[in-house]
Amino acid sequence: MLGFKAEVVLAFQLIARHRAPRLAMLLAATVVLMLLAEDGAAGSLAVRRRTVALIGGALSAVFASRLMAHGGPLSSIRRTAAPAWLVAAGRLTGLLFLTGASLLAASAIAVAGPWGVPEGLRLTAALTVHSAAVGALVMAGTPLVGASAAATLGLLASLVGNVLPSQVGALLATWPPARGAAVLGWNVLPLSWRVERWLSQGGLADPLVLLFWIAVGGLAAGCVATRALPLRPRESGSCACSNVR
């Protein structure tokens, strides 16, 4: 438990000390302030949910890209005696504390005011699970492609994640080879459209898919962290990240 706690604290430091997460927080706060200034009756509940989902996905992608960046964040995993999966779980938990607090504030402003506190809490809980799936995958991909590329892929997935699989199929109707692969990917990956369907229709399929990707991303992050990968010092998010231990 002491090692797990140390990884949670380290995740706070890795995220808070880097300028990219701070810039993402600033942009998210700007969007939330725009929602606050907007009339609550001007938009539907679904639109507000999608907006908060975009905020949560973007923050999770940027935050997670710092947790196993080349340099101190990655090399510290190889110097600790804790299992790699415990390190990944601790850092992902630290990310969820920060992302969950941001989602709670955004949901309170965008949804809880016009539609009630229970609706805002439901949205926060569902999007926290979605953010965990996004964060786990971005964290696992960071040592392989680099922090910037992993964050960019996560941001792109957040931007297009509200598009429904049926809409993707209609868009690629004239290109059958790409249509099948795109629709399959949209139905399998943890995109934000799944959160809207989960909240609207209920059921266990959507949360189970998200939990599956959380487990896959966490285990993959632990495996990738122990591989002998070339270090990239320029992508190091913090030179003192290993001093937490």
Image (tube, rainbow, N blue to C red):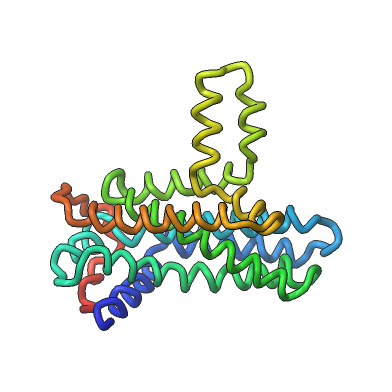
Name above or below for residue 198 compared with residue 1. Answer: above
Tell me which corner region of the image, top left, top right, bottom left or bottom right, holds residue 43: bottom right
| Front residue of 205 and 136 | 205
Could you tell me residue 97's position as x and y percent? Answer: 47, 73
Residue 138 lies left or right of residue 198; in this view the side is left
Tell me which corner region of the image, top left, top right, bottom left or bottom right, holds residue 31: bottom right
Name above or below for residue 241 compared with residue 172. Answer: below
Residue at image point 54% right, 39% down: 186
Residue 210 lies left or right of residue 199; in this view the side is left
| Front residue of 169 and 44 | 169
Location of the C terminus by quadrant is bottom left
Could you tell me residue 217's position as x and y percent? Answer: 36, 54
Residue 202 lies left or right of residue 185; in this view the side is right
Name above or below for residue 145 compared with residue 114. Answer: above
Residue at image point 73% right, 53% down: 47
Could you tell me residue 106's position as x and y percent? Answer: 64, 67
